[in-house]
Amino acid sequence: MSKSFDELVAVMAKLRAPGGCPWDHEQTYASLSQYLLEEAYETFDAIQEAAQTGDTTNLKEELGDLLLQVVFHSAIGAERGDFTIDAVAEGVTEKLVLRHPHVFGDAKLARAQDVLDNWDKLKADERAAQGKKEKTVETILDDVPVHFPALLEALKVSKKAASVGFDWENEDQIFDKLNEEVGELRNAIASGDSDDIADEIGDLLFVIVNVARRLEVEPETALKRTNRKFRQRFKFIEDELKRTGRTVNDASLREMDDLWNESKTKRLASSH
C-alpha cells in the first residue's frame, strides 16, 4: 500500500494496543456500526455539496473519516484473527476483476444495464463456486434488506418487481396513479383517520419514488438537493429580516413568502 495508508494502519494499531487509547481499545464491530452509518451519511452529504459548489474539501475529509471506519474494523479483525486490511483490499480487487470480464477478459458488454445484469449472474456463480448456500427466500424482494432507509428500500423493491415485468407501461400511467393516490389521501384527511392518513402518505411517497425510478433519478439524492435548496432559501429569509432588526417570529407569512420568492429570483439571476 502507499506510505500514507500504511501510516494510517500503524496509527490505528497503536491506538488499539496496550497503552494506547482506552476508548479505541474498547470498540467492537458492533459498537462501531453506528459510526460507520453516520460517516456514510456525512460522506453522502459532502458529495451533494461538492456537486453543487465544486468544492471538494469536505468530501476529502469525509472520505477520510469513512476510510477510518474500514481501517478500524480491519484492525479489530486482525487482532481477532478474522481478517486483515490487506485481505479486505485483496478481496475487493479480486471481486472487481472477476465481475468486469468486459474489461479484464473477452466479454462484450455494450450497455450499462448489460453490466448490471451480468454482475448479478456472476455474484450467483461465485456463491455456487464457493459452496455458499443460497439464501432461503420466500420472495425475490427478500434480496432487498429491510433495514435500508425507506426511500432506498422503496427504490430497490420497485426495481426488483419491475425486473420481472411488474411495472407501469409508461410514465403517463404512473402519473395517473399519482393523481389517484392524492385523491385517496384527501379522502383519508377528510375522514380524520390518522392510520389511513399515514398509509396514504406512504402510498404517495412510494409512487413518487417510482416516478424517479422511471426517469432514472436517484430519489435520495433528489430529496437531498431539495433539502439543501430549502435551507438556503429559508436562510435568505432570516438574513433579510435580520437586516431590519427582525426575526422570522416577527414576520407575517406573506412577508416570508415574498422573501422566499425573492430568493428564488436572485438565485436564478446568479446562475446566468
Image (tube, helix red, strand yellow):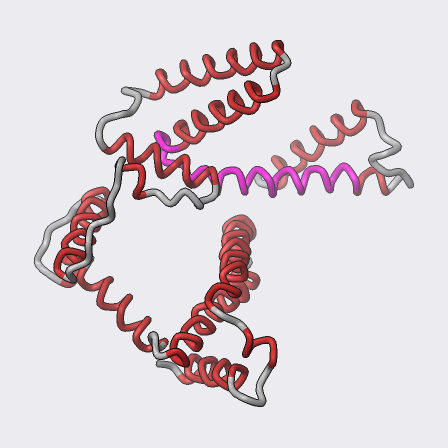
Relative to 188, 91 lies left or right: left
x and y percentages locating residue 10 in the rendered image: 46, 85
Using the image, determine if residue 261 lies above or below residue 117: above
- The range drawn in magenta is 213-238
Q: Main secondary structure of the magenta part?
A: helix
Farthest left residue in view: 106
For the image, the number of numbered tags is 0
Closer-to-camera residue (234/80): 80
The residue sitting at 34% across, 32% down in the picture is 158
Q: Would you say residue 153 sits in the magenta stretch?
A: no
Kindly indicate the quadrant of the structure image that contains residue 92.
bottom left
Q: Would you say residue 237 sits in the magenta stretch?
A: yes
- Quadrant of the rendering where the N terminus is positioned: bottom left
Closer-to-camera residue (33/86): 33
The residue sitting at 44% across, 73% down in the picture is 71
Relative to 110, 142 lies left or right: right
Using the image, determine if residue 44 lies above or below residue 233: below
x and y percentages locating residue 214 in the rendered image: 35, 30
Using the image, determine if residue 219 lies above or below residue 58: above
